[in-house]
Amino acid sequence: MSFLEHLDELRKRILIAVGAVFTGFCVALLFIDNIFGFIMRPLQQALPAGGKLIYTEPTEAFILYMKVAALAGLVLAAPIILWQVWLFVAPGLYSHEKKFAIPFVALATFFFVMGALFSHFMVFPWAWKFFAGFSKDYMQFTPKIEPAFSLYTKMLLSFGLVFQMPTIVFFLARMGMITAGFLIRKTKYAILTIFIVAAILTPGPDVVSQTLMAAPMFALYAISIVIAWLFQKRSAI
């Protein structure tokens, strides 16, 4: 394929992915009240009794509903987006590597959803309660809904991306590019990289958020070593 043909193929895959997100957005709008309550519940539970998130702009709440629907649409469209990514890179792969299409989409989707759920049920509520805990005698925690949801979204997408580590290791191991021994030998470099990535992906500069991001990454790296040992090419060095 020429350079222009590559650009045309990329445009095609992007349009399909955008169409999938828009379709997911429309579907999410049908259940927006349930989805909105699911997302807002952990935010509201960290507030003092009777406390509520506030908004100060007339259109702020409406736009928030649209953003929630867009986020849900992105999650719903994840399998199609990943499939388009695979179709774009597949022409550059060998024939024996193209058979990993279905495992790639399945594993990447599974770990993205697991990362999102891990953020929603565990990491974000803990971090939110930590920040809300500074409300003492001289301060009252009355957060605006927009920055609160922005923090929620950044953490959810970050963990969705971080949880792709086992998927990436699986395919690199199957292609003979890495082994479990290689990952073990590079652990000290992995630790440094994890802290750098955690500092980049966390929405705030605080150590708590970075630690909450780094801790599961260490666990995922350990899981990735096991995956590499199970699925690596035995002839690989």
Image (spheres, rainbow, N blue to C red):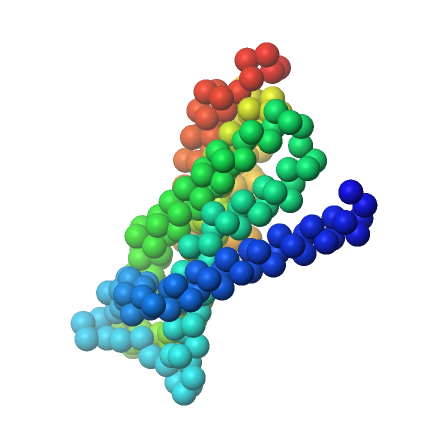
Q: Could you tell me residue 9's position as x and y percent?
A: 69, 50
Q: Could you tell me residue 16's position as x and y percent?
A: 57, 56
Picture quadrant of residue 83: top right
Residue 155 in the figure: left or right of residue 140: right
Taking 28 as reference, is 157 above or below it?
Answer: above
Picture quadrant of residue 181: top right
Q: Residue at x 76, y 49 (%)?
A: 5
Residue sitting nearer the eye, 140 or 236: 236
Residue pushed farthest top?
A: 235
Q: Could you tell me residue 32's position as x and y percent?
A: 33, 68
For the question of whether residue 188 can be seen, the reply is: no
Residue sitting nearer the eye, 59 or 136: 59
Q: Residue at x 60, y 22 (%)?
A: 176
Residue 206 in the figure: left or right of residue 98: left
Q: Could you tell me residue 142's position as x and y percent?
A: 32, 76
Taking 219 as reference, is 143 above or below it?
Answer: below
